[in-house]
Image (spheres, rainbow, N blue to C red):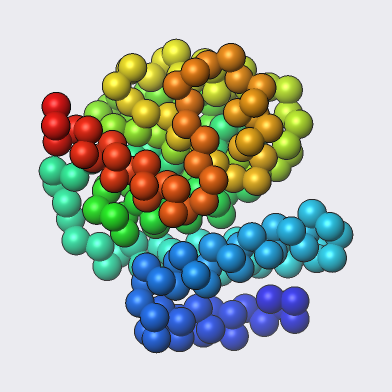
Amino acid sequence: MKRIEQPLLTELLENARIRYGHRVTLLRVVAPFVHEVGEGWRKGELRVAHEHLATAVVRDFLSLGARSYPKRLNAPELIVSTPAGQTHEVGALLVAAAARDVGWRATYLGPSLPAEEIAACAKQRQAQAVALSLVYPNDDPDVPGELSRLRKLLPQNVALLIGGRAAYGYHQALRVPDVRLITDLGALESALEELTAAKTKS
C-alpha cells in the first residue's frame, strides 16, 4: 500500500481469503490493516492518497465477498452508514461485511447521510438495528445532535450502534441512554447475536 501497488494489494487480500477463509481474513487481516492505515494517516506517516487507495481496495474486496452470501429472506436486517459530515466509509463497509458473516442482511447506504435519511431507510426496510461508523473528524459539533435526532426518529425497538476511532468521544457527549458503543468487530458480532436472541424470545 505504501508503494501504491494496487494490484499487489488486491492479490494479497485475495490470497488471504483463499488461505484463511472470508471471516478470518475480515477479522484478522482486513480490520487490522484498515486500523494501521488510519493510524498512519492520522500521524502524518501516510498521505491522503494512501488512505484513499486502501479504501478503494478494501471496498472492492468486500463488495466481491458480499456476492457470495446466500439470500436470507427472514434474517434480521442492519442498516449501515456514517452520519452527516463523516466521510470515511471503510469502517462502515467492514461492519456490513461482519454482519453478513453472522447471518444478518446488511444494507449499506454509503457515507455522510443525515439522520432523517437513515431513519427513513430503517423504517422502510423494517430493520432491527442501525450501525454507524465514526472515524474523522472526532470533534464535529454537529455529530452528537445528528445521533440524538436519529435515536428519536428510529422506533424504540430498533437498536442504534456506533463504532469507530471517534465513536467513544461522541458517545460520551450524548445525552441519550440507548445508543450502544461498539469497540471492535468482535463486539459488533456479540451485539448482533444478542439482538437475534432477543428477537427470538419475543
Query: Is the residue 169 above or below the residue 173 in the image?
Result: below
- Quarter of the figure that contains the N terminus: bottom right
Q: Quadrant of the C terminus?
A: top left
Q: Is residue 28 visible?
A: yes
Is residue 153 positioned above or below 44 on the image? above
Q: Is residue 134 left or right of residue 190?
A: right
Q: Give me the residue at 44% from left, 48% from top.
A: 187
**Left/right of residue 195 with respect to residue 163 in the rendered view:** left
Q: Answer with the quarter of the image where residue 43 lies.
A: bottom right
Q: In which quarter of the image is residue 71?
A: bottom left
| Residue drawn at the location 39% of the way across and 80% of the way down | 20
The picture places residue 96, in percent across and down from the top left corner, at 40, 51
Furthest-right residue in view? Answer: 44
Q: In which quarter of the image is residue 147?
A: top right
- Measured as percent of width and height from the top left, residue 3 is found at 75, 81
Counting the numbered discs, the total is 0
User: Residue 87: horizontal and vertical position, in percent?
Assistant: 63, 43
State left or right for residue 77 relative to residue 55. left
Q: Is residue 127 visible?
A: no
